[in-house]
Image: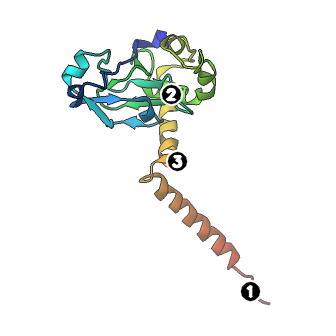
């Protein structure tokens, strides 16, 4: 991963005891929001003062974000930020070099590697860290092939998870199936 990234970083958390650090206009992502989806909003925001007084830093849009810790199934989940945002320290933020790799391809590769990635956790909580993510292997086919793969997987993901496109496609397929079987079941040979 390190070879295809312009930057790999984690974020930070402003002191929760300082109310003036929260409720601003800076999106701040926590690991529970990293859940195999594009991120266009966050449930928590921080202020400029919160940003200045913590390790939180700006992450450019279209970065691949990996939850490096978290209870249960959170550790190892992946997302892509569609807005510029900041994150807590439990997120590994990968700014993919567009000349070397397509960010959607990297996203789908890491989604596919969820179990293996999780198995590489260390310590009492089996947390991942930036070093583990940066050294994680990724095959890099030609750029056009990466885009083709990402587009196909994005399409399937939309069919499965996006109710506005997946459900209508499923309804259409079931209607065609119904018409096919109805026609076969209700077609009789004429009596001689």
Q: In the image, residue 79 lies at what x, y percent?
A: 44, 31
Q: SS at mark 3?
A: helix
Q: In the image, residue 66 lies at what x, y percent?
A: 47, 24
What residue is at 57 percent from the left and 63 percent from the top?
Answer: 174
Residue 186 in which image quadrant: bottom right
Which quarter shows the C terminus? Answer: bottom right
Specify which label sits upstream in the sequence, 3 or 1. Answer: 3
In the displayed structure, 96 sits above or below 76; it is above
Q: In the image, residue 41 lies at what x, y percent?
A: 31, 37
Report, in whole angstroms, how far the alpha carbon at label 2 lies from the one at label 1. 67 Å
Q: Which residue is denoted by mark 1 in the rendering?
A: 190
Q: In the image, residue 184 lies at what x, y percent?
A: 68, 73
Compare residues 128 and 85 and report the one nearer the observer. 128
In the displayed structure, 191 sits above or below 6; it is below
Q: Which residue is denoted by mark 3 in the rendering?
A: 160
Asked if the residue under mark 2 is in contact with the one under mark 3, i.e. CB atoms within 8 Å, the reply is no
Residue 101 in which image quadrant: top left
Asked if the residue under mark 1 is in contact with the one under mark 2, i.e. CB atoms within 8 Å, the reply is no
Q: Is residue 132 left or right of residue 182?
A: left
Compare residues 176 and 1 and report the one nearer the observer. 1
What residue is at 55 percent from the left and 19 percent from the top?
Answer: 127
Residue 70 shows which numbered tag? 2
Q: SS at mark 1?
A: loop
């Amino acid at each position: 991963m390190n070879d295809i990234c312009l930057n790999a970083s984690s974020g930070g958390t402003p002191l929760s005891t300082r109310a003036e650090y929260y409720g601003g206009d800076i999106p701040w992502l926590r690991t529970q929001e990293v859940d195999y989806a594009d991120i266009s909003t966050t449930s928590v925001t921080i202020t400029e003062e919160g940003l200045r007084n913590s390790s939180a830093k700006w992450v450019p849009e279209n970065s691949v974000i990996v939850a490096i810790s978290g209870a249960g199934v959170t550790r190892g989940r992946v997302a892509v930020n569609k807005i510029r945002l900041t994150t807590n320290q439990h997120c590994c933020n990968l700014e993919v070099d567009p000349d070397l790799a397509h960010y959607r391809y990297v996203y789908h590769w890491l989604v596919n590697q969820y179990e293996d990635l999780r198995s590489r956790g260390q310590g009492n909580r089996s947390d991942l860290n930036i070093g583990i993510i940066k050294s994680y292997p990724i095959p890099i086919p030609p750029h056009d092939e990466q885009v083709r793969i990402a587009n196909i997987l994005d399409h399937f993901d939309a069919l499965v998870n996006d109710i506005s496109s997946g459900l209508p496609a499923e309804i259409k397929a079931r209607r065609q199936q119904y018409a096919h079987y109805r026609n076969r079941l209700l077609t009789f040979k004429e009596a001689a």
